[in-house]
Structure formats: structure tokens, C-alpha cells
Image (cartoon, helix red, strand yellow):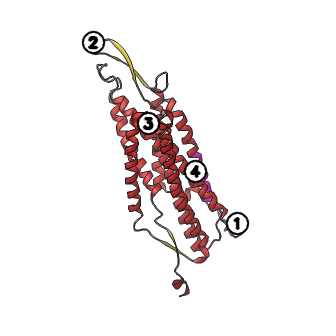
């Protein structure tokens, strides 16, 4: 797994590019002007921004810390662990916002999680989850007895039966701890979405509802994108390793590749999954386009 260090360098460069893309996407936003009596929402927005920044920083620290250990399992788990640390930080931010509510004044209404989840990002996160499940199936079906290498049987050019293997391979040795961390991330996402939809609303006037819903959609979108990013953070390296091992299985020993064109197919899937994962990262990093802005005092007095 130490050979994956160059991959981490590529990931850092791509992450920087995603940050630039996120900033570009935030340009031309539509500020939502609110009055002074909605000051709690302004404080909540500031808290969401701080928690998102803290989530990125803590996530990066987790990735670097685990990768720096040089241990294969921890290196394989580092990307998804970093995302999950970020998700947990976002959830803690939502808990803090919930404690800011003034319960008796909250409007009574039934709010559903799906009312705030962006459909497009939900579809992307669902595709990334399916890609992860496919990577897990490939890894488990083709793993060797030691659960960390690919094994295969083939025929040599001379017609002799032969068998071989190559490593590292994302079998259960590497997948088990990473999937456990991923499940924690899914649970955190579900909890965070319930907090976003379920926290009390301090009133029911139209301006407050409009501004509060904008903040809830932003928070829910970040959580859903984070869940997709967690799936992609595990699926992409697993699929890339599968592509490299399958495409070169039996080189120098077998008459033909024992897996045929499977490596090419997996490589194509890895490319698509990589693009969707980067898009999820962009959505996580993108600032709020519909940001809440306090109404100027001169405008209020007029």
C-alpha cells in the first residue's frame, strides 16, 4: 500500500482544483436580505460556515495523520475516515444550531427531510454508493486466502496450468475497517439530516420561513454531498487498484489475461466514479449561494 503515496499527491492537487471550482460556483449568488428580528438565523449561518471550515480542516488532518502511519490498513481507510470526521463535525454544528432555538416561539409545522435534500446531489450520492458496493463485490469475489491479494489461474503459452496473484488488493483485509468507518458516516448523515429538518423554527412569518429554509437546504446539501464523497473516497481507490491488477493479471506468465476485458471495464467505471466524487467534493466546499444578509439600517428606517 506504500505505492499509493503518489496517488495521495494527485488527490491533494485535485482537491485544490475542486476548491477553486467551488469558489467559482459561489460567484453570482443571490443574497437573502433579512431583518434584525431574524438575527438568530444570521448567527446560525455563521455557525454553519465555521463548522464547515472546521470539518474540512479536521478531515484533512485525519487523512494526513492516518496516511503518515505507513500502515496499509490505515492508508486504505484514510480517505473515507477524513470525510467521516468532516461529517461528524457538520452534525455537531447542527446540534449547536438546535440549541440556539427558542422553543416556545417556534412555529408548529411538519417538515420532512426530503423537502431540503437536493435531488441532483442525492442521485449522485446514490450512484457513488452503488459504485462502492460494486467495488466491494469485486474485491471479495476475487481475493486470495490472505484477503489482501488478487489470485487467478490461467494457462501459459506452452499450455501448462499456472496460478498467480498480485497485491495490494482491496479484499476484506483492507475493506473491513474502511466499511465500518463508512457506515459511521452514513449514520452521521442520517442523524444530521433529521437535525436539519427537525430543529424548531422561531416563528412562522414568511420572511423567517424563506430565510430559514434557505439555510436548511444549504446544510442538507452539504450532508448529502458528504455522504457521496465518503462513498467515493472508498470506491475510487478500490476501483483503481482493481483496474490496475485486473488489467495486468498474468503479465509475463499467462497466454492471455485471465480476466479478459474486465480490467478495461473497471477502469472506465473508476473514471466516472472519480468525476462524480470530485463533483461531490466541489459541492461540499462550495459556499452558500443564497447567503443571508442583514438589512442595512438606512433601509430599515426608510
Q: Name the residue under label 4.
A: 88
Give the side of residue 170 with respect to residue 97, left or right.
left
Q: Name the residue under label 2.
A: 158
Residue 62, given in percent of the width and then of the height, sits at: 52, 46
Q: Which of marks 3 and 2 is nearer the N terminus?
A: 2
Residue 78, given in percent of the width and then of the height, sits at: 49, 41
Q: Name the residue under label 1.
A: 103
Residue 156, given in percent of the width and then of the height, sits at: 30, 15
Residue at (40% x, 48% y) in the render: 12
* Disc 1 to disc 2, C-alpha distance: 79 Å
Q: Earlier in the sequence, mark 1 or mark 4?
A: 4
**Position above or below: 165 against 47:** above
Give the side of residue 74 with respect to residue 152, left or right.
right
| Element on which disc 2 rests | loop
Q: Name the residue under label 3.
A: 238
**Position above or below: 88 against 145:** below
Q: Magenta part mainly helix, strand or loop?
A: helix
Q: Earlier in the sequence, mark 3 or mark 1?
A: 1
Q: Quadrant of residue 107?
A: bottom right
Q: Is residue 117 visible?
A: no
Q: Earlier in the sequence, mark 1 or mark 2?
A: 1
| Element on which disc 3 rests | helix
Q: Is the residue under label 2 in contact with that under label 3 (CB below 8 Å)?
A: no
Q: What stretch is highlighted in magenta?
A: 186-206
Residue 92, given in percent of the width and then of the height, sits at: 61, 55
Q: Quadrant of residue 91?
A: bottom right
Q: Which of marks 4 and 2 is in front?
A: 4
* Disc 1 to disc 4, C-alpha distance: 25 Å
* Disc 4 to disc 2, C-alpha distance: 57 Å
Query: Is residue 205 inside the magenta stretch?
Result: yes
Amino acid at each position: 500500500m506504500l505505492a499509493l503515496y503518489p496517488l495521495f499527491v494527485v488527490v491533494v492537487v485535485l482537491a485544490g482544483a475542486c476548491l477553486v471550482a467551488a469558489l467559482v460556483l459561489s460567484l453570482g449568488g443571490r443574497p437573502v436580505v433579512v431583518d434584525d428580528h431574524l438575527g438568530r438565523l444570521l448567527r446560525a449561518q455563521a455557525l454553519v460556515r465555521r463548522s464547515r471550515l472546521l470539518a474540512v480542516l479536521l478531515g484533512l488532518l485525519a487523512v494526513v495523520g492516518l496516511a503518515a502511519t505507513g500502515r496499509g490498513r490505515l492508508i486504505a481507510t484514510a480517505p473515507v475516515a477524513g470525510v467521516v470526521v468532516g461529517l461528524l463535525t457538520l452534525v455537531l454544528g447542527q446540534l449547536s444550531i438546535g440549541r440556539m432555538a427558542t422553543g416556545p416561539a417556534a412555529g408548529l409545522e411538519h417538515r420532512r427531510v426530503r423537502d431540503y435534500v437536493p435531488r441532483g446531489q442525492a442521485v449522485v450520492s446514490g450512484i457513488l454508493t452503488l459504485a462502492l458496493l460494486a467495488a466491494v463485490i469485486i474485491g471479495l469475489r476475487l481475493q486470495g486466502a490472505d484477503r489482501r491479494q488478487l489470485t487467478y489461474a490461467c494457462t501459459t503459452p506452452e499450455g501448462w496450468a499456472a496460478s498467480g496473484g498480485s497485491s495490494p488488493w482491496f479484499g476484506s483485509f483492507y475493506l473491513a475497517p474502511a466499511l465500518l468507518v463508512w457506515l459511521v458516516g452514513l449514520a452521521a448523515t442520517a442523524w444530521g439530516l433529521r437535525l436539519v429538518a427537525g430543529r424548531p423554527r422561531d416563528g412562522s412569518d414568511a420572511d423567517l420561513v424563506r430565510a430559514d429554509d434557505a439555510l436548511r437546504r444549504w446544510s442538507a446539501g452539504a450532508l448529502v454531498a458528504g455522504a457521496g464523497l465518503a462513498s467515493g473516497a472508498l470506491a475510487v481507490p478500490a476501483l483503481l487498484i482493481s483496474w490496475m491488477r485486473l488489467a495486468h493479471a498474468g503479465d509475463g506468465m499467462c497466454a492471455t489475461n485471465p480476466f479478459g476485458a474486465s480490467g478495461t471495464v473497471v477502469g472506465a467505471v473508476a473514471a466516472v466514479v472519480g468525476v462524480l466524487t470530485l463533483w461531490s467534493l466541489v459541492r461540499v466546499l462550495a459556499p452558500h449561494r443564497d447567503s443571508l444578509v442583514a438589512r442595512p439600517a438606512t433601509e430599515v428606517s426608510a
